[in-house]
Image (cartoon, rainbow, N blue to C red):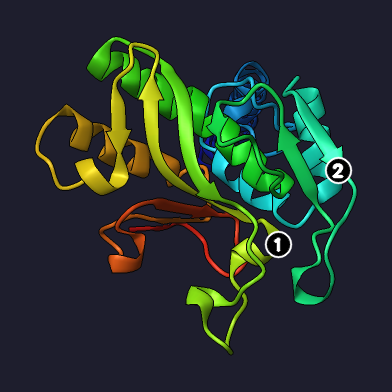
């Protein structure tokens, strides 16, 4: 009797392993199918900026900072209009990666930046600026005012120390916005307000934090009282102030 019961228990344990294996295989297949249908959450899927922002988007954007060829492939794959310019400069201010977005509402003109910065700018306008402008003002962004991208200088214009990300155009400073209905929003003038313009500026700052490695605003220090600083520095990750 005990011997027969032992055999049954052994068979039951084997059956349980088979059932567990089948359940695990089913879950794995379901997960793979779901990730295939939602590439924005799939860390192994090639980045396409046309996909919604997902769990894996930020890490994929960060990876572009060190892979210019892949970044340009992403812009091509995503049908983002851009020009690749010849390298320029020398020494610490040598700009090997000069990418200029096409059909992008920067003013005055659209400066060349690094490819990763360009990708962050594209997503920021599409997924943050325009949705927030329409939600708060019922109008889209027409102009993004900037203070420049390239400046061959060290941090804060010092004579020594680390070089600024602007030295290689791996950064851009944003001063304000003009909406399609004529509404003007200024970082310097409107940041400290308590109305819709101040709320929009904070939403624009907060929303940029998932698209850039460094985001600095007037909350950071007095040097940023009139602009947002965005960069794709390899030194930092998710600095948002």
Residue bearing the label numbered 2: 85
In the image shown, does 1 or 135 lie closer to the viewer? Answer: 135
Callout 1 environment at 10 Å: few (<14), some (14 to 19), or many (20+)? many
Residue 103 versus residue 209 in the image, above or below: above
Residue 182 shows in this picture: yes
> Residue reaching furthest right?
86
> Residue reaching furthest left?
194
> Residue reaching furthest bottom?
160
Q: How many marks can you see?
A: 2
Task: Report x, y in % for residue 219.
Answer: 25, 59
> How many angstroms separate mark 1 from mark 2 (CA)?
13 Å
Decide if residue 43 is on the left or right side of residue 105: right
Decide if residue 97 is on the left or right side of residue 152: right
Q: Could you say whether the residue bearing mark 2 is in a helix, strand or loop?
A: strand
The quarter holding residue 152 reads bottom right
The quarter holding residue 220 reads bottom left
Residue at the (64%, 36%) spot, across then down: 110
Residue at the (88%, 55%) spot, across then down: 87
Residue 64 versus residue 16 in the image, above or below: below
Residue at the (35%, 67%) spot, across then down: 223
Please state, as top left, top right, bottom left or bottom right, where the C terminus lies in the image.
Answer: bottom left
Task: Report x, y in % for residue 41.
Answer: 57, 31
Q: Earlier in the sequence, mark 1 or mark 2?
A: 2
Task: Report x, y in % for residue 159.
Answer: 57, 88
Q: Are marks 1 and 2 in contact (CB under 8 Å)?
A: no
In the image shown, does 226 or 53 lie closer to the viewer? Answer: 226
Task: Check residue 168 in the rendering and tell me which mark sits there, or answer none.
Answer: 1
């Amino acid at each position: 009797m005990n011997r027969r019961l032992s055999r049954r228990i052994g068979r039951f344990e084997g059956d349980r392993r088979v059932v567990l294996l089948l359940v695990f295989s089913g879950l794995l297949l379901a997960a793979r199918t779901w990730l295939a249908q939602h590439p924005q959450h799939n860390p192994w899927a090639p980045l396409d900026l046309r996909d919604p922002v997902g769990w894996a988007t930020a890490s994929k954007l960060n990876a572009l900072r060190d892979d210019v060829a892949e970044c340009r492939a992403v812009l091509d794959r995503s049908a983002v209009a851009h020009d690749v310019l010849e390298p320029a400069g020398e020494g610490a201010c040598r700009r090997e990666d000069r990418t200029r977005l096409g059909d992008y509402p920067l003013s005055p003109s659209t400066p060349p930046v690094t490819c990763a910065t360009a990708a962050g700018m594209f997503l920021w306008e599409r997924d943050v600026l325009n949705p927030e402008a329409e939600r708060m003002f019922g109008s889209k962004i027409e102009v993004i005012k900037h203070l420049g991208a390239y400046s061959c200088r060290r941090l804060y214009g010092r004579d020594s120390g680390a070089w600024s990300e602007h030295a290689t155009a791996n950064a851009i400073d944003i001063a304000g916005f003009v909406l399609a209905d004529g509404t003007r929003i200024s970082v310097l003038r409107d940041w400290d307000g308590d109305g819709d313009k101040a709320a929009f500026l904070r939403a624009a700052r907060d929303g940029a934090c998932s698209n850039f490695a460094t985001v600095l605003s007037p909350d950071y220090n007095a040097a940023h009282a009139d602009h947002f600083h965005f960069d794709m520095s390899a030194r930092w990750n998710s600095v948002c102030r």
